[in-house]
Image (cartoon, grey):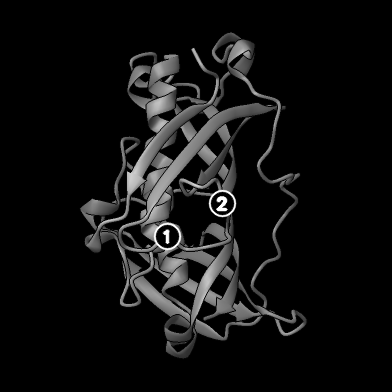
Amino acid sequence: MDKIFRKTYPIHYYEVDFRGLALPQTILNFLQDAAGDHAAALGFSVLALLKKRMTWLLSRYRVQVLRFPKVGDSVRLATWPSGKKGVFALRDFEAEDPEGRIFFRATSSWVLWNIPDRQPARLEENLPDEATVERRSIDDPFLPLPAVERVDQEAEFKVWMQDIDFNNHVNHASYILWALETPPEEVLRSSVPTEIEAAYKAEAFYGDEVVSRLERDASAAETVFRHGLFHKAKGTELVRLRTSWRQL
């Protein structure tokens, strides 16, 4: 079996924004779909792990978009397990057009979670070394992200059933989409997010209310925001993010 999993995705009209560019959620869905298919082929999908009372929990995510695919484009996505770092399993991605030009790339860090014990499971016993390709699409050591210190913008979101995944908590993509909805309208209409970094810290569940807070990084030459998503009732920080935006 090829260690690198590949899958092609056409871009449909229902997957683009008002400019005809692929929505961020479209890209996130492609990444999640390819990772899930590859994990299933290797025998450690979420469904397979749940039978063993284990699951995957996403710890860190970084997505870089060089070009947003448009309606009618064909996205050729490759993904592979890219190594182990302590209790974390790394997975990377690259997406190209048919001519081999990069659309977007991503890297991620996952914890194999023992559900009854509520602690990480040993990767050596559950993730075969022969499945690993020692190559990173983004060479990221996953250093801590800065916290929001000054709230420049704030929005609230209710967790709907559509946000809940196989682990019965909010899917990692929903947090990113809430953060991307928080910048001012003039940014959302004139710019696109070219880099998304996320650090996952706690869980939210159906019916919870989430507060998305944003601080613009005045020291950056480009448009950069720091984000913090918090459980409204408890005040717990759920996810910390940093996004970069490019004007079209």
- Residue receiving disc 1: 69
| Residue 15 percent across, percent down from the top left | 29, 60
- Tell whether 7 sits left or right of 123: left
Disc number at residue 98? none
In whole angstroms, how far apart are the C-alphas of marks 1 and 2? 11 Å
Coordinates of residue 183 in the picture (x, y in percent): 49, 80
Number of numbered discs present? 2
Residue found 38% across the figure and 21% down from its top: 40
The residue positioned 47% from the left and 49% from the top of the image is 97
Residue nearer the viewer, 205 or 6: 6
- What residue sits right under mark 2 in the picture? 101
Q: Earlier in the sequence, mark 1 or mark 2?
A: 1
Residue 157: x %, y % from top left: 34, 69
Q: Secondary structure at mark 1?
A: loop
Instruction: Look at label 2 and name its amino acid.
Output: Arg
Residue drawn at x 52%, y 17% is 2
